[in-house]
Every structure is written in structure tokens, then in C-alpha cells.
Image (tube, helix red, strand yellow):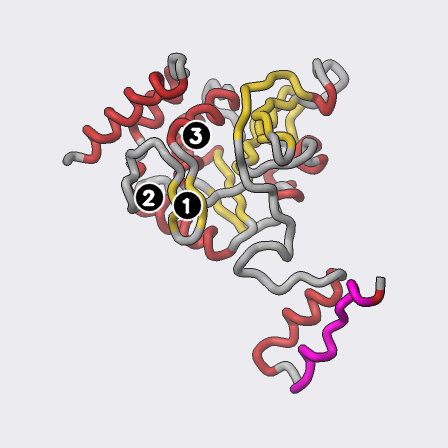
């Protein structure tokens, strides 16, 4: 069947599954982005999927995130957790591709997202390999930050990189999580700067450098991780056996 028809059917069904009307701009953006270019297996089914070893959010979840993000057009946006690039592409439709920066802790996913975004016409979206907890200070301040991973409280670096009128949207809590919007400044309405809550969600926790599945084995010190990386393929024999397991010494 024509992907455009399937895409129309997908978005038409989202209002029924969410029980409310979609934000008009989000509705149009999701009807525009060819999701089948990012997801190979049943791309227009309203369910989570796995692509290139990464979780791809269900369309209804993406719609909830972007409605909470509350863009009006032209904002500078950071997407933390680029994944396959689909959410970043929809954000690009909302604010313009040159206004979207996306980061992911997995270099494999960064390369995958860059490829998919380029082949679908969103090559203006910048995708970089970064630790999401540190944000992307080179391009701050951001009018909007979307974190596609759960955290117990708003990551301080991400809040600090918001513009004065900015907004951070992320799943807060663990294991029970709530989708929240956070704004900076003393005028914020609730604890941790939470200004709005959008109901329960379930996301994987945010990873920090060393926890990504395609990265180096994590030990207790940054120095050791760096030494292991610098040892390369020609590390001297027995190096691995000299690795310090700090758990045995605590």
C-alpha cells in the first residue's frame, strides 16, 4: 500500500488512541515525515519498534512528546537521544531543520540517524555523539530541549542550557515515570521547575558515558577508560588481567 496512505491512517488513529485532538502543527508534521524511511518493520503501526538495536518510540508517544514541547516555529531545539532520527525529523518539520541539534551517546546510532535524515531530505539536522547528561553547550541556549530517556530529576546541564523562556520535556521518575515540562527560573510553579505534567510514560533510563552498549567497558575512573581507549589494538599482553576491579577493594 502507498506509504502516504498508511501515514494518513496512522495519524488519523492517533487521536482515538490518545483520546484527544492532536496539536495541529504536530498533526501536519507527522503526516509529512516518511516514517518508513526510519523504521523498516511495520513503520505505521502504533507501537514501539526496534531498529538497528535501538528502541523507536510509538507514534502516539512521539505525538505526546512534541505536543508537550509546545513549539511555535523557529525555536532552537536540542533532541537528547537521537535514536534512528525520526523524532528529530518531525521536530525539523516544526521548527526548521537548521534549528535542530540531536545528540546520542551511541556512535553507531549517530551514524545511522545521520544516514536516514540525509536520505529523507533532513540533512540540515545536526547529529553528534555526546553524553546526553552534558547536553550540547556549543549550541546553547536552547528554546526547547527534548530528552527521550528517563531521569529522577531534571539534568542540571540541560536546564542550565535553556534560554530564559525555554522548556525541557522529559520522563521524570523511575520506575514509575511522568512526562513533565520544566522551565528555568524562580517563577517555575513546582518542585524541580516542573510547570506541567502530561501523564504516565515508560522510558529506559538515561545512560551516561561508559554505559552505552557499543562503548568501552565501564570501570570506576575516567582515567582508566581513557587509558583503555588509548591502548588500541596493540595493547601489551596481560593488560586486561591488570584491570582494577574496584568492587573488590571497597
The answer to whether residue 127 is above or below residue 30 is below
Neighbour tally class for label 2: few under 14, some 14-19, many 20 plus, Cα within 10 Å: some
Indicate the position of residue 98 as horizontal and vertical percent values: 45, 36
Where does label 2 land, which residue? 39
Residue 246 counted in the magenta span: yes
Instruction: Work out whether residue 191 or residue 114 is closer to the camera in this orientation and state it.
Output: 191
Which residue is identified by label 1? 84
The label shown at residue 62 is: 3
Residue 186 at x, y percent in the picture: 76, 17
Residue at 53% from the left image edge and 45% from the top image edge: 103
- Residue 168 - label: none
Q: Nearer the viewer, residue 229 or 123?
A: 229
Expressed as whole percent of the image width and height from the top left, the position of residue 21 reads 38, 13
Q: The N terminus is located in which quarter?
A: top left
Q: Quadrant of residue 4?
A: top left
Asked whether the residues under the numbered discs 2 and 3 touch, taking CB atoms below 8 Å apart as contact, a structural biologist would say no
In the shown orientation, is residue 110 left or right of residue 38?
Answer: right
Are the residues tagged 1 and 2 within 8 Å (C-beta)? yes
In the picture, residue 187 is in which quadrant? top right
Q: Earlier in the sequence, mark 1 or mark 2?
A: 2
Residue 13 vs 39, above or below: the answer is above
Residue in the foreground of this view, choosing between 80 and 214: 214
Q: Which residues are magenta?
A: 237-248
Q: Are marks 1 and 3 in contact (CB under 8 Å)?
A: no
> How far from the left and from the top, in percent, is residue 231?
65, 76
Q: Earlier in the sequence, mark 1 or mark 3?
A: 3
How far apart marks 1 and 3 lie (CA) works out to 13 Å
Q: CA distance from mark 1 to mark 2?
A: 8 Å
Amino acid at each position: 500500500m502507498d506509504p502516504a496512505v498508511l501515514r494518513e491512517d496512522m495519524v488519523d488513529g492517533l487521536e482515538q488512541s490518545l483520546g484527544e485532538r492532536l496539536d495541529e502543527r504536530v498533526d501536519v508534521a507527522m503526516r509529512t515525515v516518511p516514517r518508513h524511511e526510519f523504521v523498516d518493520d511495520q513503520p505505521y503501526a502504533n507501537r514501539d519498534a526496534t531498529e538497528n538495536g535501538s528502541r523507536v518510540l510509538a507514534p502516539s508517544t512521539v505525538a505526546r512528546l512534541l505536543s508537550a514541547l509546545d513549539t511555535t516555529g523557529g525555536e532552537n531545539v536540542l533532541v537528547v537521544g537521537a535514536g534512528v532520527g525520526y523524532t528529530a525529523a518531525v521536530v525539523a518539520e516544526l521548527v526548521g531543520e537548521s534549528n535542530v541539534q540531536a545528540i546520542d551517546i551511541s556512535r553507531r546510532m549517530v551514524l545511522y540517524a545521520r544516514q536516514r535524515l540525509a536520505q529523507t531530505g533532513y540533512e540540515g539536522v545536526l547529529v553528534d555523539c555526546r553524553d546526553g547528561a552534558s547536553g550540547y553547550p556549543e549550541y546553547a541556549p536552547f528554546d526547547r530541549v527534548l530528552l527521550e530517556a528517563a531521569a529522577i530529576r531534571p539534568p542540571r546541564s540541560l536546564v542550565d542550557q535553556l534560554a530564559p523562556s525555554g522548556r525541557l520535556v522529559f520522563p521524570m521518575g523511575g520506575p514509575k515515570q511522568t512526562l513533565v515540562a520544566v522551565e528555568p527560573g524562580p517563577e517555575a510553579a513546582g518542585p524541580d521547575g516542573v510547570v506541567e505534567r502530561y501523564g504516565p510514560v515508560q522510558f529506559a533510563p538515561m545512560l551516561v558515558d561508559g554505559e552505552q552498549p557499543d562503548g568501552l567497558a565501564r570501570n570506576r575512573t575516567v582515567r582508566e577508560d581513557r587509558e583503555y581507549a588509548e591502548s588500541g589494538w596493540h595493547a601489551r599482553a596481560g593488560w586486561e588481567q591488570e584491570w582494577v576491579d574496584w568492587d573488590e577493594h571497597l
